[in-house]
Amino acid sequence: MSSALDRLKDLTTKISSYERVRKENLSILEELFYDISINEKVENFSDIFEFKALNLLGASLQSETLGELRLGKYLQILAISYDKEAVIKSKNISLGYFGKVENVNPDFKDKIVEFIIRYRFEKSFMTLEHYNTMLEAFKKEDDA
């Protein structure tokens, strides 16, 4: 009995920890939204989550080389929008163009990389919630 209770306590601790981290992430993400001037292209912070994804050109987002510059390239944030009614379904939209990577202030570049990672972190929670809701359709009445 105590092992089941311990597992439940463990699970509860993990869930509350993720929710705290998520809340903090959203707060910092919103600050970065203004710091790197994404608000000039997307008026409301919450609207950035309407995009399917955000990509970064000019710097690495791989964990082994995070933030490493791609010399000779341009630093740019691209948003991918998707319209299932359109002839061309997906479209890239520039949310920020920052010039040649060699000319971007390293601290500013780090904010841009952090913004993308924090966006993807929140987007992964949203995706998880979406699929969790979809799974409700498969619950049998006996399970409820």
Image: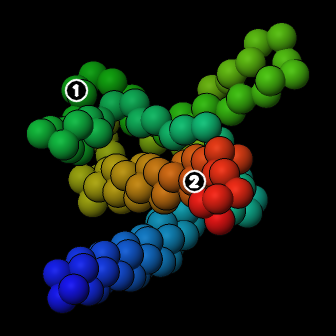
Q: Is residue 21 visible?
A: no
Q: Is residue 120 left or right of residue 137?
A: left
Residue 29 or residue 111, whichever sits in front = 29
Instruction: Provide residue 119's location: percent of width, then percent of height.
Output: 47, 54
| Quarter of the view holding residue 22 | bottom left
Residue that appears at 41% across and 36% down:
56
* 64 over 31 or under it: above or below: above
| Quarter of the view holding residue 4 | bottom left
* 10 over 72 or under it: above or below: below
Q: CA distance from mark 2 to mark 1?
A: 41 Å
**Residue at the front extreme of this rendering:** 142
Amino acid type, callout 2: Asn
In the picture, the disc for residue 71 is: 1
Quadrant of the image for the C terminus?
bottom right
Residue that appears at 12% across and 39% down:
64
Q: Single out the mark in the foreground, 2 or 1.
A: 2
Residue 140 or residue 36, whichever sits in front = 140
Kindly indicate whether the residue at mark 1 contacts the one at mark 2 (C-beta within 8 angstroms).
no
Instruction: Provide residue 73's location: percent of width, then percent of height.
Output: 33, 24
**Could you tell me which secondary element the residue under label 1 belongs to?**
loop
| Quarter of the view holding residue 47 | bottom right
Instruction: Provide residue 121's location: percent of width, then percent of height.
Output: 41, 56
Instruction: Provide residue 99's location: percent of width, then percent of height.
Output: 43, 36
Residue at mark 2: 132
